[in-house]
Image (cartoon, helix red, strand yellow):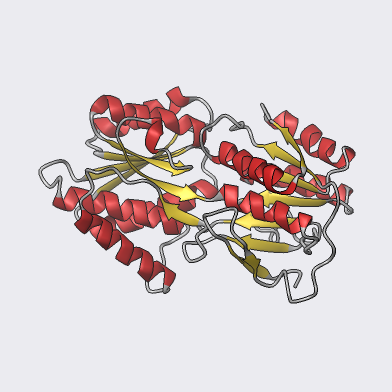
Amino acid sequence: MRGKRIIVLATVALAAAVTVTGLVSAGSAAPKQDKVKVTLVSDIGRFNDKSFNQLQLEGALKAKKDFGITLVPRQSNSVADYIPNLTAGVRNGSQLVMAAGFLLAPTTAKVAAKFPDTQFSIMDYGVNVPPFKGNKNVTGLVFPTEQAGCLVGYMAGLMLKTKWADKPQVVGAVGGIKIPSVDNWIAGYRYCAKLANKKLKVLVGYSQDFVKSDLCKAVAEDQISKGAQVLFQVAGGCGLGTLKAADDAGIWGIGVDKDQYNDAKRVLTSGVKRVDTATYLAIKAVVDGQPLGGTDLVFTLANKGQAVGRTNPVVPKSVRVQVAKIQAQIIAGKIKPPAKL
């Protein structure tokens, strides 16, 4: 099955039994490994970002609890930490070295090529394209998050069209660094916000950072000055500044990756990306002796790898019902949000 895209049938309940299509067939799994060691390397967003990196750590800690693995989290405080952190995972005998994000891709490809006997995974990057083409010891953990982005965008657009029709018909999105795993969120958000509300204007800006919340706050405040009533943050820890700006202005924020309902006072909902599920399942595959490498595990709305988070009571049932209908249409393939801006 190497070189083919694999679909993970994930569940939000991480403790539930999970089938990984194409990786397991009856009676074919290898024996479970003893004393599995896993190294998880953060990107520069760090493990305390209340978002992308933190959620991966939570998934790994869940695997540690369930499977008794040895877990070695290594935080990257700068790009210079990528090589030593990944290499340390090889040196300490880890059966799986997990790179927690798109930004680690070039370095992960180099280290994986140097150590072909160690299994690696990379979050948010497919392994059948450069720089990974030919790396048979790397597994991609991939999310087409234009799907969940569509749902939160549709909710924002519909709220302005119906409940807040007297307000400026403007929403915004504040991205971190402009990379595909940020843009696909925003592309889905923009497309479906306008699908719900053709009169809507969608503002898009970038902080060029995933850590410093003041940079996102400044971009958000600029969008607020232009009439934005809802702001979607797609910037990890930096994006908490976007949610704070929405609080201060008395408008609404939308969280990303992790359910961020409790991270600010005026969170409408969140686009949830189950990187905790992906991390957990990749570790489970190693524990179970399942083959990895040269494949992408793809997490979608259909297999519960993405979702809409807790939704504020201000959103009426009629809007929630319509968002659920859009979700069903995406799963059925009737709506295909774009992945690129």
**Seen in the image, is 237 located left or right of residue 61?**
left
Q: In terms of image quadrants, where is residue 93? A: top right
Q: In terms of image quadrants, where is residue 42? A: top right
**Seen in the image, is 73 located left or right of residue 166?**
right
Q: Position of residue 230 (x, y in %)?
A: 28, 40
Q: Position of residue 204 (x, y in %)?
A: 37, 42
Q: Is residue 127 above or below residue 104?
A: below
The quadrant the C terminus occupies is bottom left
The residue shown at (45%, 57%) is 146
The residue shown at (48%, 55%) is 306
Q: Nearer the viewer, residue 58 or 264?
A: 58
Q: Residue furthest left?
A: 166
Q: Is residue 169 visible?
A: yes
Q: Is residue 195 visible?
A: no
Q: Position of residue 247 (x, y in %)?
A: 29, 28
The residue shown at (62%, 45%) is 59
**Seen in the image, is 198 located left or right of residue 13?**
left
